[in-house]
Image (cartoon, rainbow, N blue to C red):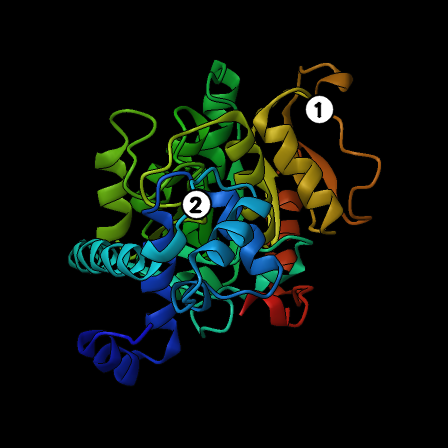
Amino acid sequence: MKLPNELEMQRDILGSSAEEAHALLALASLKGVGYWTLFKLKREGISARSILELSDGKEVTTTLTRLGAKIGASGGDWADASRRALERAHRVFDQMENEGIRIVFPDSPAYPKSLLALDDPPAWLFVRGEASVLSEPSITAVGTRNPSPDGEWLSKFVGINFADWKAVTVSGLAAGMDQAVHNLSIRMGVPTIAVLGTGIKTEYPKGSGRIADMIVSEGGAIVTEYLPNDSYSGENFVRRNRLQAALGKVLIPIEWSPKSGTAHTVNYAATLSRPIAALRVTDWPDGRVVLPRNAHSNSRIFTIPRDQDRFFEFVQKALAEPLRTREIQPNLI
């Protein structure tokens, strides 16, 4: 299928990534084609634009259904269907550009190399705001949606240190600890990154749009691997947590339980050998905060305020250490 003149011009300006972005959005607009189908497509080294350019509708149907899509046979109508899908993609792409949203692929300089430490790095990212902060040395700080008074105090203690660490922060925009981290980052004048478990155009939790706007206006970023209008699910949030763990040079779980979303982030950080600075207050029982068995040898539990100096130095040292990454996988480009 021949590309429209407009897309050819954008390709000249932005390179093949613009073409692939349009193609990705076009396939995502097809009924029955979702995130997992497109993710598997990329993992197999098949570009979205190569699917659009196929002339055989049966081949398209066979390929997409094999990867989990629930679509009917396209037959000889694929040329027309792909043309209309690309027209829809143009409209979505233009709207996203107007809202400051871009699609970043692994071969882009804006793609954070820290994510390449993952066994299954995102095949693309939707980014709203300042994409460059994704590659800055950062601190991931997360915690429960329902903090205790002790947890709220710990979050403020951590947040006040952001001004001196002068590092980008990463959290998940969830109610409770995550939003506290974002708000305290803004208060301390450091950029903050919100990693979503939904599409970038889905407001979750309800009412979080105001904080998201502040994050962007203060030089931070909103990022997700999910398709623009994808809703929330337990699986999406668990997978989101691996991105939080990978983006940070150090993880600070502020208040959490062994069976929680934060625990998933802690376990991902341990698998990635990221240093973990877990916190407790003086009168918490010893078993309330426990690090995973496979935690980085440099991970520690700090009692606050008794260990506040050692905690500060631990984070500062972790920020100065080189970050383990991998080469870009060819099948993700």
For the residue pair 269 and 66, the one nearer the viewer reads as 66
Number of other residues with Cα within 10 Å of mark 2, as a class: few under 14, some 14 to 19, many 20 or more: some
Asked whether the residues under the numbered discs 1 and 2 touch, taking CB atoms below 8 Å apart as contact, a structural biologist would say no
For the residue pair 5 and 147, the one nearer the viewer reads as 5
Q: Answer left or right for 247 relative to 217.
A: right
For the residue pair 303 and 211, the one nearer the viewer reads as 211
What percent of the width, then of the height, locates residue 69? 49, 42
For the residue pair 30 and 195, the one nearer the viewer reads as 30
Residue 289: which numbered mark, if any?
1
Q: Helix, strand or loop at disc 2?
A: loop
What percent of the width, then of the height, locates residue 187? 30, 43
Q: Helix, strand or loop at disc 1?
A: loop
Query: Is there any visible trace of residue 161 in the rendered image?
Result: no
Can you name the residue that lies furthest to the bottom here? 12
- The picture quadrant where one finds residue 325 is bottom right
**Residue at coordinates 48% horizontally, 54% vertically from top-left?**
58
Residue under pointer 2: 73
**Residue at coordinates 49% horizontally, 66% vertically from top-left?**
47
Residue 257 position (above or below residue 104): above
- Sequence-first disc among 1 and 2: 2
Residue 113 position (above or below residue 236): below
Residue 219 position (above or below residue 208): below
Mark 1: amino acid: Val
What percent of the width, then of the height, locates residue 125? 43, 56
- Quadrant of the image for the N terminus? bottom left
Question: Looking at the image, is mark 1 or mark 2 nearer the viewer?
Answer: 2
Query: Is there any visible trace of residue 54 in the rendered image?
Result: yes
Q: Answer left or right for 133 relative to 252.
A: left
**Residue at coordinates 67% horizontally, 45% vertically from top-left?**
310
Alpha-carbon span between mark 1 and mark 2: 54 Å
What percent of the width, then of the height, locates residue 24? 38, 58
Give the total number of marks visible in the rendering. 2
